[in-house]
Image: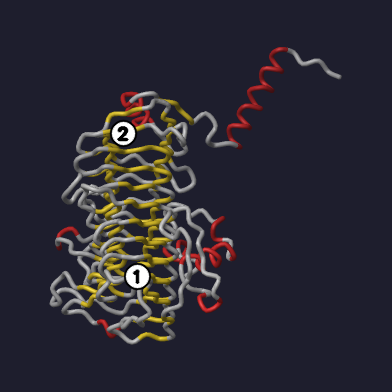
Amino acid sequence: MPIQTPAVSQRTTCLAILALALASPALGQEVVVNNTVELREELQRAEPGTTIRLEGSSYESGLWIDGVAGTKDKPIIITGADEKNPPVFMGENQAIHLVGCNYITLRNIRVTGCKANGINADDGGRYEFPPAGLVFENVTIDRIGPTGNHDGLKLSGLDGFTVRDCRFDGWGGSAIDMVGCRNGLVVGCRFFGRKGYSQSSGVQAKGGSENITIRRSFFKDAGQRSINIGGSTGLRYFRPKLRDYEARAIIVEGNRFVGSAAPIAYVTSVDCVVRQNTIVHPEKWIVRILQEQPTEKFRPCQGSTFESNLVMFDERVRSLINVGPNTLPMTFSFRGNAWFRSDSDRRPILPLDEIDGIYQIDPMLKDAETPASTARSKDPRLLGIGAHAFDKQYAGAGLEKQTKEPGSSASENQTDR
């Protein structure tokens, strides 16, 4: 066996290291920071594929991240080192502001006690260049506001984004507020209203937002409207340009709602779908159909669907569906929903015709008001209805194994539409 000289051996080692580096592009691109100063320095140097691990327990709020960009194949990842004990950004007006950033993943952190917004991500007013590929994963945002238009996660002008497995607990305006966003996915998140916080809505998509899916999340007392499909946006804030709708092609599926004045509100929106959700004991309405923009500039709220939802309610709900003026409720489709009034045998009355509605079959759900609930009805007449049915369909299609890549198209985000 030939004996390698030191020079040959050194050269062989260098070639091996080079080959390994080429095979593993992320090798050597992980950096560790312990405070905000180090984090700012590493963000200035960050390149596609960089992972920044936050080891310290607390960081200063007011972090401004401007124009930092990874790529679809090599996103920049900013992550707490320990997901069970995440670093905390506390106080000030706003914890983190991402401006014109692309392909950044923010993971395993907590934001708390901010007066304005928790996290803000936007296009910096450059509507023609929508930020792509932002991912927010396992982020906790709590105690924001506490009152007024102050949001947990404020997103403006994003294209192709994901909010996954995040928790929101107490906010002023919306837990997630989207203005002019498109091709997005909110999945596996939890929303908890908190006493003393104004909480207008849990998730709101408005300002020309379209092709967004809100899936398999849990809402408890999450504002006046748990999900506001549409809204009322100042005309100059529509992105990328003024549309004749606030929201279009929003899908709400497989979610669980407990409480709130109205779990679902369609507001100056068109062509949206709410399906296979479970709604438990709201305070005033099940669904609202509203027009909050003038009809000479916008289409009336119209053409949406409410199907295969399981609804449990009691005497607090005097009107199942609240229909406001200047809307087109007869263009809506209500079909295959199960309605159960838990404190009376009286059949509920809908102001709109429904196809194949199911009435007064007790689903007998246990612990339905807890986020960990796996409650499902065993009544064969309720098969295919509610969040539990969506879960089964979701697992059967293997969709729980599909991680949504940032920047994916609407069709990729909504494969089981």
Q: Is residue 132 above or below residue 310?
A: above
- Crowding near pointer 1: few (<14 within 10 Å), some, many (20+)? many
Quadrant of residue 271 in the image?
A: bottom left
Where residue 25 sits in the image (x, y, percent)?
A: 54, 37
Give the labeled residue for mark 2.
89
| Structural crowding at the residue carrying mark 2, measured as other residues with C-alpha within 10 Å and reported as few (<14), some (14–19) or many (≥20) | many
Outermost residue to the right = 1
Which residue is outermost to the front?
344
**The N terminus lies in quadrant:** top right
Residue nearest the viewer, comparing 75 with 213 = 213
Q: Residue at x 42, y 44 (%)?
A: 138
Q: Which mark is residue 313?
A: 1
Name above or below for residue 221 compared with residue 40: below
| Drawn side of residue 190 relative to residue 156, left or right | right
Q: How is the image coloured?
A: secondary structure
Q: Which amino acid does the dot numbered 1 rest on?
A: Phe
Q: How many marks?
A: 2
- Using the rendered view, name the quadrant where residue 109 is placed: top left
Left or right? Give the position of 244 relative to 368: left
Q: Secondary structure at mark 1?
A: strand
Decide: is 127 above or below 87.
below
Task: Find residue 403 and report its horizontal and vertical position in percent.
Answer: 51, 53
Disc sitting over residue 219 in the figure: none
Q: CA distance from mark 1 to mark 2?
A: 39 Å
Location of residue 116 (image quadrant): top left
Which is nearer the N-term, disc 1 or disc 2? 2
Q: Are marks 1 and 2 in contact (CB under 8 Å)?
A: no
**Along the line of sight, the residue nearer the viewer: 326 or 25:** 326
